[in-house]
Image (cartoon, helix red, strand yellow):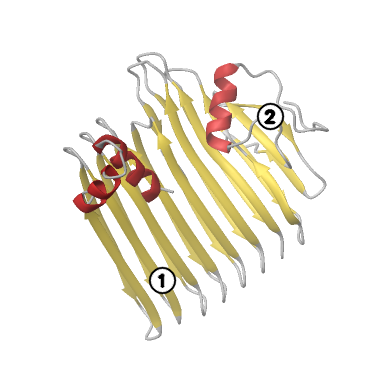
Amino acid sequence: MQEIEERGVIKNLDKIDKTLLEQVTGVEGEFEGAYNIRKNGKGIERKITPNINIVTKEDVSGIDVYVKENTKLEFVHIPVIITESGLTDVVYNDFYIGKNANVIIIAGCGIHNDHCDDSRHDGIHRFFLEEGAKVKYYEKHYGEGEGTGKRILNPITEVTLKEGSSLEMDSVQIKGVDSTIRTTKGNLIGDNTNFVITEKIMTHGEQMAKTIFEVNLNGQNASTHVTSRSVATGNSKQIFDSKVYGNSACFGHVECDAIIKDHATVTSTPEITANHVDANLIHEAAIGKIAGDQLIKLMTLGLTEEQAEQEIIKGFLK
């Protein structure tokens, strides 16, 4: 593997590789900051910076990412792409964020499957934030290809926050993912910690998506805000399972909104448990079809019913 590259130019990628990378990272051409690219179960290219080091694990497949304390607004890209049908890729990535560091981490996986065997990626990411550290974490999942083999993604994210630290997680399932179980766990052990989770999912056909959130608010004035927005169409199935435990003087808010169409099903089970008299916890859930008056309003502007639906869904998931 190439350990250090002076510029962020990604080499030796074909058209499919580049498309997958662009879909999950939103970047065309060069990456800014540090990066590690994984393809078909192997690291293929890497760049480190003076403040961000990336080390290959020796016991299991994966990497350790070290961000120095007081690092200011640097990027880390760790995309995964799979183009091999029948592959099951499991990777363990740990992130150690130094005191008062501020970093943006862009992850995600894109799968291209043109054959009959299933392709699967299970990414287990653990974040350890020191005092005052701040992380924005973006994770996108995308599937494509003409084959009958399924595109399966099962990400697991575990977050540990020390005093005054915060992590904002933005998770998106773009399209083409046949089956996914997304598990996110937060352990807010320090005072004045904050964990914000936002997810957006769209399913169609026979796809299945399950989301599992579990957050423990242990520190004084710890807080979390969990927001899930999803659209289920065709015969797809979605399950939203969220648990927030208030173990101190803390604040937690769980919100699940879903649009349902055709013969799809959506199950939402937000659960909040207060184990402290000063725990302030709220949960909300709403599932329903697109309102008729919204469709009519857009159709009076010249849109067809299908176009109006697409505009409403686009705005809902924005």
Task: In this rendered view, identify the residue nearer to me: 306 or 265.
Answer: 306
The image quarter in which residue 166 lies = bottom right
Name the mark on residue 29. Answer: 2
Side of 317 relative to 190 (left or right): left
Q: Give the mark count.
A: 2
**Which residue is the site of mark 1?**
252
Q: Amino acid at mark 1?
A: Gly
Residue 261: horizontal and vertical position, in percent?
21, 41
Name above or below for residue 157 compared with residue 84.
below
Q: Amino acid at mark 2?
A: Gly
Side of 151 relative to 15 (left or right): left
Q: Quadrant of the N terminus?
A: top right
Task: In this rendered view, identify the residue nearer to me: 23 or 121.
Answer: 23
The residue shown at (79%, 50%) is 51
> Nearer the viewer's eye, disc 2 or disc 1?
2
The image quarter in which residue 155 lies = top left
Asked which secondary structure carries label 1, the reply is strand
